Image (cartoon, grey):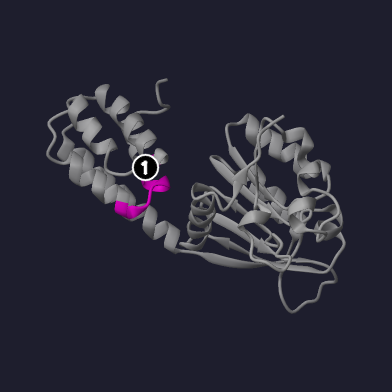
Amino acid sequence: MTPPGGLESQIQQIASTLPPAQIDQLAKAIERLDGPGEQGRSRAASLTASQSFKTAVANLWQAWSREPETTGFGIALALRSAALTAERMRSASSLEVVWTGPTSNEVPVRKSAQVLERLIDDARRRLIIVSFAAYKVNSIEERLRAAADRGVGIDLVLETEADSKGGLRVDAAEAFEALKGIAKFWVWPASSRPDGGAVLHAKAAIRDTSAALVTSANFTGRALERNMELGLLVTGGPVPRRLADHFDALMARSELIQLESD
């Protein structure tokens, strides 16, 4: 499959999605190459085991093969420049209070449901949603389906009745029944938990490694619209990426297990 966009587009994509250390490794591997040869591509792809890195290298090489007059030194310079710009943009983070419940004039707030809906609507690559309890919320389900339709990868990390050992009465995944086959469902199996009835109690939504909602609110209509709930929306900076990387690490080492689709 031909990747979208040209060489400039692929360089920008790499700068916005790969960690700076991986971009620097890639730039070092490319800067002395005269062109997009297969040996150079294979060597570059082997620098890390990350599948996202290998995919980025493959897409970059395909774009480079359509502009073979561009030198490896030029691409390496462009990668480093784009990465520096992206890092400066990410470092400019902001925090907003997210709140459901009675308001005051002391702190400007954004409603929990509105923030979650906006995060889903703005997603372009990936969403990670984590919740203890979840009940069907039509507006959230519709937005997640629309996100999947435009190519967004969706990971739902949810608690189960069995694994919670009585902490939850209904599997959270039932709220997203209509998304089976569209989203990936992940659980924290009881076999991986400390003794004493530990539960998956985190609630968060992470968008494209560039924004994250960390909240007390479960993804239920009551919590998003009626309860007194408090959270923070982090936009930019290193925190959203670190949170996404943390969940990716838990998935990679099977602390979180993906449920098979029926």
Horizontal arrangement in the rendering, residue 77 relative to residue 135 (left or right): left
Identify the image quadrant of residue 109.
bottom right
Task: Tell me if residue 36 can be seen.
Answer: no
Main SS, magenta region, reads helix
Identify the image quadrant of residue 151.
top right
Quadrant of the snapshot with the N terminus: top left
Q: Position of residue 143 (x, y in %)?
A: 72, 39
Q: Does residue 114 sit above or below 176 in this rendering?
A: below
At label 1, the amino acid type is Ile
Q: Position of residue 261 (x, y in %)?
A: 68, 32
Label 1: how many residues lie within 10 Å, few (<14), some (14-19) or many (20+)?
A: many
Horizontal arrangement in the rendering, residue 157 relative to residue 103 (left or right): left
What residue appears at the point 65 percent right and 53 percent down from the top-left corner? 188
Horizontal arrangement in the rendering, residue 31 relative to residue 149 (left or right): left
Quadrant of the snapshot with the C terminus: top right
Q: Position of residue 165 (x, y in %)?
A: 78, 58
What residue appears at the point 16 percent right and 28 percent down from the top-left corner? 35
Q: Position of residue 180 (x, y in %)?
A: 71, 33
Q: Residue placed farthest to the bottom in the image?
A: 106
SS at badge 1? helix
Horizontal arrangement in the rendering, residue 242 relative to residue 115 (left or right): left
**Disc 1 target residue:** 14
What residue appears at the point 19 percent right and 32 percent down from the top-left corner? 40
Task: Please state which of residues 77 and 204 is positioned toward the viewer in this rendering.
Answer: 204
Count the marks: 1
Q: Residue 27 magenta-drawn?
A: no
Task: Tell me if residue 35 can be seen.
Answer: yes
What residue appears at the point 67 percent right and 61 percent down from the top-left corner? 202
Magenta extent: 13-21
